[in-house]
Image (cartoon, helix red, strand yellow):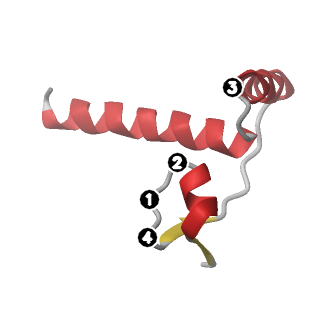
Amino acid sequence: MKHAVMTGKRAERKGMNSQKTVLVRASISFPPDLYKTLEEIAKKKKVSLAWVVRDAAERYAASESKKRRGA
């Protein structure tokens, strides 16, 4: 598995701390209507589509984690 390391100003712009941040690249397929919606969200927020997907995945994972803990 390949890992990308992002540091410094680029990591800060992406909302990550300036320490070395290891990212794993994934290829994901979306239905066309969902992809279009994600692109529109990214454009409105002035962020990348990848940022929108990461943000959504982080929120989903946090929600699932709370469910497993019984919160």
Measured from the top left, where is residue 48 in percent x and y? 73, 41
Asked whether the residues under the numbered discs 3 and 4 touch, taking CB atoms below 8 Å apart as contact, a structural biologist would say no
Amino acid found under the numbered disc labelled 3: Lys
Query: Do the residues bearing badges 1 and 4 touch, measured as CB atoms within 8 Å?
Result: yes
Q: Amino acid at mark 4?
A: Gln
Specify the amino acid type for callout 2.
Answer: Gly
Q: Position of residue 40 (x, y in %)?
A: 79, 22
What residue is shown at x 69% (from left), y 26% (from top)? 45
Q: Are marks 3 and 2 in contact (CB under 8 Å)?
A: no
- Residue 10 to residue 68: above or below: below
Which residue is label 2 attached to? 15
Residue drawn at x 63%, y 78% is 2
Q: Is residue 1 above or below residue 63?
A: below
Give the residue number, with chain letter if any, for mark 1: 17
* C-alpha span from label 4 to label 2: 12 Å
Taking the image as shown, residue 19 lies to the left or right of residue 9, namely left
Kindly give the residue lying farthest to the bottom in the view shown: 2
